[in-house]
Each structure stands twice: as structure tokens, then as C-alpha cells.
Image (cartoon, rainbow, N blue to C red):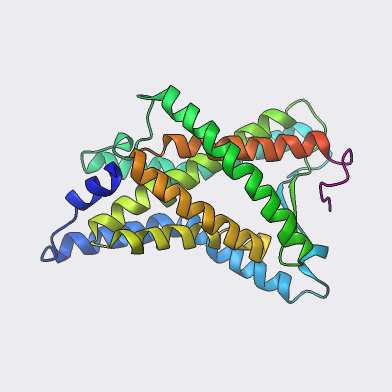
Amino acid sequence: MQAQARDAADAVPAEDGRLRRLLRSELLLVLALSLGASAVGALISFLGSVTEPGGLADQAATLNSSDAPGRPWLDLAWQLFGITTALVPVALVAHLLLREGAGLPVIGFDLRRPRFDLAWGAVVAACIGGTGLLLYLGARAAGANLTVVPENLPDVWWKIPVLVASAVQNSVLEEVIVVGYLLRRLGQLGWTPAAALAASAVLRGSYHLYQGIGGFFGNMAMGVVFVLLYRRWGRVGPLVAAHALIDIVAFVGYALLEGRVDWLPTA
């Protein structure tokens, strides 16, 4: 319960209305530049999918696609550009936390406990990864989810490294912002632990809506688990490791198994 207690201790007094307004505006701006905007885009994408003729299972959502087909070096440049710029909101959060005298270590994103982070990250990934795959297959079979295509990059030398980098970028962006930063700011703004947990989980589910109803509820459940673990450990490090491992297995595993097994849905 370290993180929960720390956030409660940092709560801004209700009478300090100016600081609360500044924190509220800061939070909204960070979300508007990152996962909040992704949630709105995912909602628009979902509305487009459900109004498309045919079922959701007949449609596909591609996660890592080529940006310059037939031009591998230009494609690589675009891939690296996208991965790097997607991490700018994390740099902004680091700057904002540093300005308040805390920095990223206050949410447990540092190298102080690497073995702890990696070990527990692997355990969490093993538990959630398999369950998530079963939920996805079930949701798709029920017609509540699009076919998720983890990658359709060309078969070039940089394919696997880019997929790994993309997985790490996703994990850092999501866990730093939607768990560590969001819960800290909501705690400072006086939100109850239950309300902050719900906000974090719903936000996580919302920016996965482009995958369908299954993607929304599956990721919302994952969000609940991740918030509870964060409050237990006081660190996003294990969550970043777990998320990265889950995505690496999904991206690289799909690249290696596509067309080779019958149970893996393809577009």
C-alpha cells in the first residue's frame, strides 16, 4: 500500500484552489497529448467498426504496420520516429514530477530494484498473458472483437528489433502515465482510491476500444490488477516489465507463428 499512502500524504489541501486547478489542467493536458487522445481515437475507430457491414470478427486491427512499403530504410526511419515521439509524454511527465521535487523514482520507475522488477514482471506477464490470449480468442469467437494483427512489417533485418522496441515503448508510455502519474495526480486532487482505480482502468480499456468490446473489458480488468499491484509494491517498474514481456511475446510470437498454427487468427 506504499503508493496509496504516499499519494494520500501528498494530497493538496482543499482550500488551495489555485494549485488544484493547476494540477487538474496539467493532468488534462498530459492526457490530451497521450493516452486520452488515443482513447478518443479508439472510440471513433470502434464506432466506425460497429457501423461497418459485417461483424467485428470479419475486420482487423493492425498494431505494427509498414509506413513505407517497399522502401525498408525509409520504413525503418518512420518506425524509429514513431517509437521515439510516442515517448515524449513520458519525458514531459518526468519533467513535471521533477519540478515538484520528486521525479520518476516517486512512482517507482528507476533502476534501484531491477531484479525485483524483472522477476515480478515475468510472473505477472505469465499470469496475465495466457489469460488475455484466451479472453481475446473467446471474444473474437463471440463476435465482440476485431481480429488483432500484432504486426505486418516486411521481412527485413530490423523487423524483430523494431517489434521489441515498440513493445517496450507501449509498456513505458502506458504504465508511467495511466498508473504512476495518473494515480499520483488524482490522489493529490483528493480522489478516493476506488475512484482513482476506476478512472485508471476505464482509461486503459478506452484506448483499446479499437480492438472491440473484448479489448475494452479485457484491458480494463488488466488495469484493475495493475493498479492493485502498484499500490502493493509502490513501483511501476514490475508493471512496465510485465507489459513489455506480454507485448514482446505477442508481437514476435505472431511474426514467427503466423500461418504456421491453426489456432492463431489472421487477417
Q: Which residues are magenta?
A: 258-267
Q: Position of residue 213 (x, y in %)?
A: 64, 66
| Place of residue 229 in the rendered image (x, y in percent of width and height, measured from the top left) | 41, 44
Q: Please identify the dominant SS of the magenta region.
A: loop
Q: Measuring 38% from the left and 25% from the top, which residue is drawn there?
A: 113
Q: Give percent across and percent down for residue 16.
A: 12, 62
Residue 161 in view: yes
Q: Nearer the viewer, residue 232 or 154?
A: 232
Whether residue 226 sits left or right of residue 233 in the image: it is right
Q: Nearer the viewer, residue 264 or 203?
A: 264
Where, by quadrant of the figure, is residue 64 drawn? top right
Q: How many marks?
A: 0
Residue 259 place in picture, x, y as percent: 89, 41
Q: Quadrant of residue 218?
A: bottom right
Q: Is residue 199 shown left or right of residue 151?
A: left
Classify residue 166 by image quadrant.
top right
Residue in the image at 84% along x and 47% along y: 263
Q: Quadrant of the N terminus?
A: top left
Q: Is residue 45 above or below residue 124?
A: below
Residue 127 covered by magenta stretch: no
